[in-house]
Amino acid sequence: MSPPAAGSNGSGGGEAGGAGTSAEGGVSGTGVATGGRGGGSTAGSGGATGGRGGSSTAGSGGAAGGPPSGGACSRELLKGTVDAYFKALAAHSSAGLPIAGTVKATENGKVIKVGEDGLWKTAGVLKYKHTAYDVDGCNTASEAVVPEGSMDLPVALRLKLVDQKITEIETIAVRPGDYKVSGSNFPSKPDAIIMSDTSVGWEKPVPEAMRNTAKEMNAWMLKYFKAFPAGVCNTVSNCQRQENGNSPGNCSLGGSCQTAEPTGTVLKSHIIFSDVETGIGVGFDLFMGNTDMHMFKMYGGKVYAVHAILGAAATTGWDDK
């Protein structure tokens, strides 16, 4: 189900319910991006604070006038960086990308050299992507379909920018046999990832009246990880789950929603953040021997889709707690 058009009366939403639980004390590493109304942009490695509307454009410049000055982070800067990254990947050259000298990059949990290893040697021209842009923390997360030879791969890409330079790159590229649980292989369906854009409307802006705050969205993902599978809360009846494009069924299949806050951590994660403007939230974690990106679409306190990109790995390569 696509979100209502901007300016609608916001019918069909629902109550925020469990999405408004506290996100304190949950995720470390790069940090959890949280916030309330009216915050400005703050980039850094310790988590970003900001608020509703924080994902809207900040600074000046953008695609037409160049990047914002003074190290500011804007939606245009993030979009331009993601687009440039995928073009550079297809060209098998990182020349021209704003890569920080201290950049850390991983692919399927292993540290790689930017421009030299993994997909950098094999990727074709991007076929599809949808992306969450977190202006407050200057983070992006994309679910994408990238060709490798004659095969299309489900791909997750996370970028972190500081002072307009890429400081962190996390990639999950799923090849046949890369997603396993308890020794069983699970197939990928890249075409279903592409088709989901019609049903979910991933990057379609959510009307202001139906937007959840970053704090609410991050708390939903945090509870999902910490209590899984008892943290699958606030999903609509037709919410579809995908794993590398393959759908095992409804989002709540095999799950439940506990009312109490989790006292432990089932799935360890290293970053959670949200794009308030489009209602896309993301989290990166380690799931049963797989490095994993979870992405969800939320508005009016309800979750309309949950997608995961998973690839076999002993570690994510990041600080999961």
Image: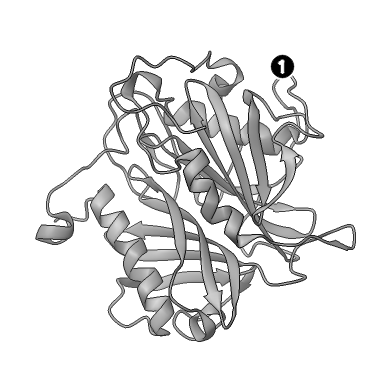
* 123 horizontally vs 221: left or right: left
Q: Is residue 165 above or below residue 217?
A: below
* 13 horizontally vs 178: left or right: left
Q: Secondary structure at mark 1?
A: loop
The residue depicted at 75 percent of the width and 28 percent of the height is 263
Is 265 or 170 nearer to us in this picture? 170
Q: Is residue 189 above or below residue 204?
A: below
Residue farthest toward the left in the current orientation of the protein: 65
Query: Label 1 belongs to which residue?
Result: 259
Is 313 or 16 nearer to us in this picture? 16
Residue 70: % across, % down: 16, 55
Q: Given the image, on which type of amino acid does mark 1 rest?
A: Thr
Mark count: 1
Residue 321: % across, % down: 66, 47
* 100 horizontally vs 271: left or right: left
Residue 319: % across, % down: 61, 56
Q: Is residue 24 visible?
A: no
